[in-house]
Image (tube, rainbow, N blue to C red):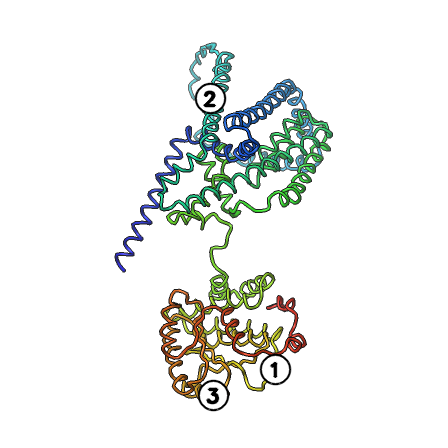
Amino acid sequence: MARNEAQQSNTQVFTLVLVVVCVAALYLAKEVLIPLALATLLTFILAPLVDRLERLGLWRVPSITAVVLFALTVIGGVTYLVAEELVDLSGNLPAYERTITGKVHDLKNSTSGPLAKVQQIVGKLGREFSRSTPLPEDNAIDDKASPPETVKPIPVEIVEPAGSSLGFLGDLLSGAFGGLATVGVVMLFLVFMLASREDLRDRLIRLVGPDQITVTTQALDDAARRVSRYLRMQLIINAGFGLMLAVGLYFIGLPNALLWGLVAGLLRYIPYLGAWLGAAVAVAISLAVFDGWTQPLLILGLVVVAELVTGNLLEPVLFHSSTGISTIGILVAAVFWTWLWGGMGLVLSTPLTVCLSVLGRYVPQLEFFNVLLSDESVLHPGAQFYQRLLVGDLDGARALVDTHLKEKSVTELYEEMLLPALSLTTQDAYRGNLTPEKRDFIYENIREVLDELAELEAIPAEQLAGGKPAVVCVPARDASDEIAATMLQQRLLAGGITAEVLSSKVLVSELVDQIAELSPHVVFISSVPPFAGRYASNLCKRLHSRLSDLRIFVAIWGDEAHQKTAEQRLRGAGAEKVVIALSDALALVDRHVPSVPKAVIDAQSVKTEAVGQVGAP
């Protein structure tokens, strides 16, 4: 045990050190890794086009050439349009400056309005402070002081400004050459990645290990599918948003509408804030262009409408499945990648985070990525329900029950939520992690849920044929076994099979006497781990020795790990069959016990739609 704990601790330390080293490498090598990441994402977008051309009969090299030239044409066309718009914008800057100066002057000279009132208050406070602050005695003017010395004139030198035309031209050319070099490196990576897709995949599989070929292939396919779909759909949605905004700005009369639509579309890649940053840019430009306030308000309304249309119409249609990243995961990833790689990291944050989440799903050592970033629930329904009751959140527990019933049946509710919660409660109570009061509190609330469901859909036993129960549900030892037996009884009654639950508070000898008196078709022993098998085995021996012809079934709820061992021991004690799931128990009883005709059930039971109101006032 100590050795296992030490190994686990060493593994955690190694994982932490590995993460720190990887983050440092990402930061120090960002000049190389950013073009590589861009090329990888472009490969995800363009690879389906290359595959389609190849399926049409075109060879690989011509297919890659055509797709890359198409991408360069699109990028070059967009760059040319942006350059033209920027040149036109630079010619209008003096007029924009005069408009802004005039608006500021009007606001400052305004005698009414909120801004004027604020200015008046600030002026009054300033005058009051200046009146009430006396001069220090040390700084008082001394009439007898000697006259000041003659101040020498300060020499004036003419220095050429640092931002001279030659310096500006050099910076401009340096930036242009740097951008062209980055584009060239990205395109070079892109061509080789498109040409060697299968070879790169084989090398990754070899690095992970040939024995992990299935897991690695699944991870690569999952990452490629999700990232490729996300990037394509996001490109379409952001382009549509920018186009809608550009058309609206054109009709409003804002100059360079195409440029501001393109800026808004690019800014929308920033999670959650991008659209509003685009709105802020457009509104700020409109304040500099138009004399009045009508057009800025129209532009703000246009952005709101465009975002509502995009978020509520386009995204639900195009995004049939999400990226698999939670909202908080996207926000944290955006902050992290921006800190690491700047603005380009912000644009790349979501697809890179999707890749990390996929790695965490398939690589056990990186599972914490999937836990931290995925939008899937990390706790199963039974653990969620148990946790709500553990902290006394009854409303939250009932809400989980209602939500579960909207999508699944009562049997699935018992099997997936209530029985696992009951098992967790029992295990923690045996370990000493629960006080008896807290354990009884959880048991009582589970019973209340069962009672409410029983009132809504159960068939009274006296209305079913036979008089005596066909199935007797016997708790193996304590209250948890009895609650689980009650779940089985309710589902049997709802299915038209008479059933009765015996109390867990009576002695074993009394249980045997009661079963002998009822003489059912089947006895079903209900037992909840962790010590379920031992008590169920003792009860089986007592029943089998007294009633040798009785059919005895045993349910060890949810104990899949020890099912085979327990089944061997229980068969030797007289049990005919051992199950671990409620659905298996119901199917087993259904094969061996006659049920009430369906007409009787339909006449007595309540429709399933009414069941979804558990806990409603």
**Considering only vertical position in the picture, is 372 above or below 62?**
below
| Of the two numbered discs 1 and 3 in the rendering, the one whose residue sits closer to the viewer | 1
**Sequence order check, earlier mark of 1 and 3:** 1
Q: Residue at x 55, y 68 (%)?
A: 411
- The three-letter code of the residue at mark 3 reads Gln
Furthest toward the front, the residue is: 57
Which residue corresponds to mark 3? 514
* 297 vs 408: above or below: above
Could you tell me residue 483's position as x and y percent? 49, 75
Residue type at mark 1?
Answer: Leu
Please name the amino acid that badge 2 sits on: Ala
- Mark 3 lies on a secondary structure that is helix
Mark sitting earlier along the chain (3/2): 2
In the image, taking residue 401 as reference, residue 482 lies left or right, namely left
Q: CA distance from mark 2 to mark 1?
A: 83 Å
**Image position, residue 210 (x, y; %):** 36, 43
Identify the residue shown where x is 47% and y is 9%.
158
Between 88 and 449, which is closer to the camera in this rendering?
449
Q: Earlier in the sequence, mark 2 or mark 1?
A: 2
Query: Alpha carbon of mark 3 to alpha carbon of mark 2: how far?
Result: 88 Å
Q: Which residue is mark 2?
A: 181
Badge 1 vs badge 3, beta-carbon distance below 8 Å: no
Q: Residues within 10 Å of mark 1 (few under 14, many from 20)?
A: many
Q: Residue at x 57, y 41 (%)?
A: 272
- Write down the residue under mark 1: 464
Q: Residue 200 shows which numbered tag? A: none
Query: Is disc 1 placed on a helix, strand or loop?
Result: loop
Question: Which of the 4 quarters of the picture holds residue 579?
Answer: bottom left
